[in-house]
Amino acid sequence: MLKKFSIIVFILMSITLIFMSTQKKLVPQIDMLTISGETISTKDLKGSVYLVNFWATDCPGCIEEMPGLIDTFNKYKNKNFTVIAVSMFYDPPSRVLSYTEKNKLPFPVTLDLDKNIMNSFDDIKLTPTSVLINKKGQVVNTIIGVLDFKDLHEKIDLMLKN
């Protein structure tokens, strides 16, 4: 009898874990102030596909993937997609501004000086970290490390079709 009960509990726990892993977390409602002075709200982004990229100017992986982020933004910017670059709290604002201007970043760049954005996205600690969000405002994927742009573009194409 105890063995049957253990098996049933195991099966129920497995089903629960599978169900939880397929559920997509909603993006928190936050406002982000860009370095150009505009406010971007996750509430206003609902209905769009977007990528929130946490980065720093002293992060080699972040610098490596920046040209790919620019290309991705330019490829999809007229298709209801955007990139939001969130500079980490420890990155000096003057360096972020200088990097943004020098490299002509075409997408919004924010400073997360109070850690509000990183904390709202489950306390992001590592850079680069990118969070892909669908039209319903759900987190589809969180990628730690340099992006695989071929894979990312496939996901974006699929999400934009739906």
Image (cartoon, rainbow, N blue to C red):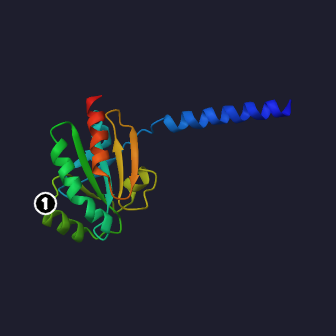
Observer-nearest residue: 143 or 81?
A: 143
- Residue 82 in percent (x, y) is at 23, 44
Say few, some or many: other residues with alpha carbon within 10 Å of mark 1 (under 14 / 14 to 19 / 20 or more): few
- Residue 122 in percent (x, y) is at 46, 51
Seen at 61% across and 34% down, the residue is 16
Seen at 37% across and 42% down, the residue is 29
Seen in the picture, residue 60 relative to 83 is either above or below; the reply is below
Quadrant position of residue 89:
bottom left
Seen in the picture, residue 78 relative to 4 is either above or below; the reply is below
Identify residue for label 1. Answer: 104
Seen in the picture, residue 94 relative to 74 is either above or below; the reply is below
**Quadrant placement of the C terminus:** top left
Observer-nearest residue: 67 or 43?
A: 67
Seen at 39% across and 51% down, the residue is 143
Seen at 79% across and 31% down, the residue is 5
Observer-nearest residue: 150 or 109?
A: 150
